[in-house]
Amino acid sequence: MDLPGLKQQLRAALGDDVVYDAPADLLPYEYDAGFEQHAPDIVVLPNSTAQVQAVVRLAGAAGVPVVARGAGTGLCNGAVPLRGGVVISMARMHRILNVDYRNRRATVQPGVINLELSEHTLPHGYYYAPDPSSQRISSIGGNVATNAGGPHCLAYGVTTNHVLELEAVLPDGSVIRTGGADDPGYDLTGLLVGSEGTLGIVTEVTVRLMRSPESVRTSLASFPTIADASNAVSSVIAHGIVPAALEMMDKLICTALEAAFHVGLPADAGAVLLAELDGPEAGIDDTLETIAAIFREYGAGNIRLAASAEERAGLWAARKGAAGAMGRLAPNYYIQDGVVPRTRLPEVMAKVEDVSREFGIPIANVFHAGDGNLHPGLLFDRRYPDQVERTFKAGDEILRACVDLGGAISGEHGIGLEKRDQMVYVFNSNDLATMAGVRACFDPRQLFNPDKILPASAQCAEITGLRDPAVMAAI
Amino acid sequence: MNLPARGETASDKQSDPDAGAPAGLRAASRRRSPRAKAPSLSDRLGKLAQLEDAHTAAGGFAMPGLFVSPPTADAVAACLREAAETGAIVAPWGGGTQQRAGNVAPRIDVAIGTTRLDAIVEWEPRDLTACIQAGATLDSVSAALAEQGQQIAIDAPAADRATIGGLIATNTSGPRRWLYGGWRDQIIGMQMALPSGDVIKSGGRVVKNVQGYDLAKLFIGSLGTLGMITQANVKLTPLPASRRILAFRGDLAQVSAFTEHVSDAPVRVSALDLLDAAAAQRCGLAGGGCVALVLIEGPEATVDGQTLSLAYMASSAALRSDSIEDGAIPPIWDSWLALARSDDLSDRQALITIGATPSETADVLRRLTESADKHGITAACWARAGNGVAYARLETPAGGTLQDAAAAIAAVQSQVMQRWPATTIVSGSVEVQRTVQPWGRPPATLELMRALKQRFDPLGIMQPSRYVGGI
């Protein structure tokens, strides 16, 4: 790696106001919202696809790894440059390029903040559906990289279901435009979404816009215990009702949220469900009443319906501010993202409580109950190494429990560095080797976000799933 | 709850592999065998799977010399490996309803059928998810799911034969794509058998999972060129309490303005198609003019409310409304789906599909009709107005030669393709299929697609040359 040479070339090609390498300038790029930290050697803030392409070409020629970065809100260390090299921040590529209301689609640069797009289109009656809790600060490009979810993905699907086309710079420096659902050929768009910057760096995203619903009903129900609330969630789904969102908050998180937001979350409930319905006005109250009846059946005492748009917004601000509010509970928190089939919620929540007791780590729960997507927040203090150790062990125990119940190790946060070694809980060596083979198609030299997603074993191992033609021919 | 595995009884009978293999095939496999003394392909496969009589097809399309039905995903993978070792060309085979799709196969040595992989492997109704084997027909799955008031929200013609695996491999969807999306929106995990002999999986069984590359996306619509889909995990959708079909009639400009208006309104309809008079007639809606055909599903109160909203919008747009009784819904729905059927195409017919944008719907239908007229072709055209995909059933006049038919259909395609490159064709005659560009204009990302194909199928045994750009 000829870093001084690369710096010089980058400066010459892009200018001093795009390329940074002073230690103080590199500092903010050492970390994201996960726990690992590593400094890049160079940070580049390109303004255009052509500049991204130039960086990729120069870094490629120098054999220097490249890590693309959105807003740095990822929880799995996907944006941490573990081997140093170049971090490409997409922060300056933040323009909404085109909004086509007639065809309900928008083309944006990757640095556009998720909520900005909806705020831009809402006056026209349209919005961008995936709404991660980080939507006030996370970028669409980062959302695409992690295939981000959010509360409203219950009814409308995650990021991949809303991305129509992509422009990306590949590790060889070429720029591709991937097609939509009706373009013949392999679905490269679908492959790139969720690939965490390991296959290509997305430089333009065309997303689907959704029509704002005619009516929305948001209700808040208090349950005696998490088990009651879990059973109520299961029952709603079993009744064939898929609400727009169905979120659970436990007692611990409600206390913290109420202190921060003052939106009237009950202090005495074992768990609270935030349920939202949307769609045509006709019939919406019947469905609401069915849900309320189910909630009551499982012991819901107080069911409160948001009376105004402001009240509704307040409830959602609290819900989406949950990660921040955990700061009121402990100096550090570790948020997990395991998923279980919705019928297994009562079991897994019991397990989470057990783990909390066993490891002596308090856990606050606020999550996408309707999807079965947990977000246990393990509370600890980083200054005590034994707490750190117990926290990660407890987290691992919870993920194993999710997998044992037929679930997944990540619902929406991604794998990154954090969970790459836990991929083996779900996938065998053939599965992983196949993924490694796909990666090798795009990035044979492993220069794009190396060390992420796949366990080290799969990256180094002989690719058995997709054998080399020469080996095959020799059989 | 499992569907009865229909293959089970047959599989109990130990059959003599050679007895099941047609004579022509044994010769074919000998010809392909790289080693003189090696056992024939049918011998090798007979140990792994049941040999069946080869299928026959109309229209002059190549048919497999050998047809095998492996009982498990592992057996599928083992068959693929055997085929790879002998260099045999493989066609994955579901219900055989879309085997004419894509570039014409010069030869098929063996079809690997999914007849015996027809179980619902896992289904917890309260989770609204299921794991289904590739060979189950859509109808059989729908019937089983309906017992608990559930469905896979994908529509397909010939659903009594079309299999889950085949529908995924061809990325087939129908009118309700407008509300529910296609397979890429319903599939949460997949199991595949690869030419390497390995069975792999991606995704998971829960509605939300982001764990590693979403390889299932690559297999959706891949026409079996990367490997064989052996089972899929899907999201299920509750069956609606009530459904209604509405038809609004006017000229093309009026009706397309109406469909745009509906997709821009805060109403929730399941399907929103625009049919020309010929297509409408095929759906039993004779009466002239174009028709906006709308499906509304949901709780009764919602369906009533939506019906009123649409009727109001239609009358404001001076459209005439057909009255459709409840009893007429099933036959209209069936013929609506059958519009896009390709297994019944005669050698003078073709089905063309054009990827456009919703705002181009009227343009693309106009261009199609004009172009068909100019070349003496009868066309029934329709579009998923909300999705911006247009279709036409084309029929060349009787009496002409097949070459004339092929030339005329190719001319229509090339005219449409000038503006819409994603214009694909399936036809009933091998002659026509050889003349047209079945996949439309190749995408700019073809090299990358080739590299992926090479990774998955380095020896090129899976449907070689059938796919986009000759992949």
Image (cartoon, helix red, strand yellow):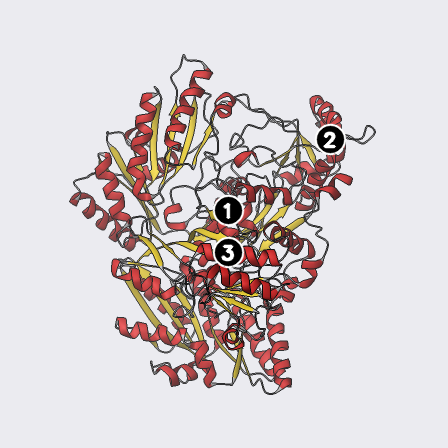
Pick the residue in front: A113 or B14. Answer: A113
Q: Position of residue A53 (x, y in %)?
A: 50, 54
Q: Mark 1 belongs to which amino acid?
A: Asp
Whole-number angstrom distance, CA of label 3 to CA of label 1? 26 Å
Q: Residue at x 61, y 82 (%)?
A: A388
Q: Mark 3 belongs to which amino acid?
A: Ala
Q: Could you say which quadrant of the image residue A340 lies in? A: bottom right
Badge 2 and badge 3 in a common chain: no
Badge 3: chain ID? A
Q: Which residue is mark 3?
A: A54
Q: Residue at x 58, y 84 (%)?
A: A382
Q: Secondary structure at mark 1?
A: loop
The disc, 3 or 1, on the residue closer to the chain's N-terminal end is 3
Q: Which residue is mark 2?
A: B42
Q: Position of residue B172 (x, y in %)?
A: 47, 40
> Do callouts 3 and 1 mark residues in contact (Cβ within 8 Å)?
no
Pick the residue in front: B54 or A451. Answer: A451
Q: Which residue is mark 1?
A: A187
